[in-house]
Image (cartoon, grey):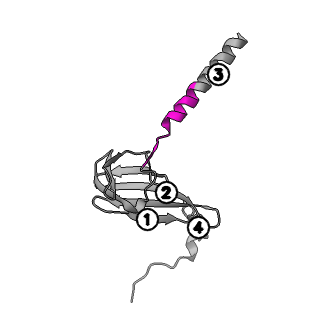
Amino acid sequence: MLRVLVLSSVLLAGAAHAAAQETVKPVIAGTENLSGLTLVKSTDDQAVVRFGQSALQVLAVGDRVGKTQATVTAIAPGRLVLEEVTTGADGKPLRAQIVVRDGQTGGKRFLRHPDLNAPLAQRPEVMDSPRPDSTRKPAGPRR
């Protein structure tokens, strides 16, 4: 019985490892800079891009692109969003989001600074001191 359990756990672990290896996609245009990427056309789930005068490439969400292996995070009609992770001079990872519109080359880069902390997502609580009704001024005629 113990052998059956060990054998089945080894088989399950091997299948999970094989499935994890299958999800890693090869890098598309691994020798190209993202500044040369032109978005030719995009739909809900695919984008057609070109690096310089090279052949057209079809991208989907999850694909890795260019020298920095930027990941395609979103594709919408008229827009492609990439996330690029590089290492700064101080050794810290730098994350950038690159948004490319149809017909645009290079796109617009938005840096995410790791040293800046986002504000807490909590609503501030305002505590009023309790007032007895006797301290209110009576409503009277206004002058």
N-term-proximal mark, 4 vs 1: 1
Q: Which residue is mark 4?
A: 116
How far is mark 4 from mark 2, CA to CA? 18 Å
Give residue 114's position: percent from left, percent from top. Answer: 59, 63
Q: What's the magenta bit mostly, secondary-structure-wise?
A: helix
The numbered mark at residue 37 is none
Mark toward the viewer: 3 or 4: 3
How far is mark 2 from mark 1, CA to CA? 9 Å
The numbered mark at residue 84 is 2
N-term-proximal mark, 2 vs 1: 2
Give residue 31's position: percent from left, percent from top. Answer: 45, 54
Q: Which residue is mark 1?
A: 109
Q: What segment is highlighted magenta in the picture? A: 15-28
Say whether residue 18 is magenta.
yes
Name the kind of residue labelled 1 in the image: Arg
In percent of the image, x 70 and y 9: which residue is there?
1
Mark toward the viewer: 4 or 1: 1
Check if mark 1's residue and mark 3's residue have beta carbons within 8 Å.
no
How far is mark 3 from mark 4, CA to CA? 44 Å
Q: Which residue is mark 3?
A: 10
| Residue 119 lies in quadrant | bottom right
N-term-proximal mark, 2 vs 3: 3
Give residue 26's position: percent from left, percent from top. Answer: 46, 42
Name the kind of residue labelled 2 in the image: Glu
In percent of the image, x 42 and y 59: which residue is there?
34
In percent of the image, x 57 and y 62: which residue is there?
120
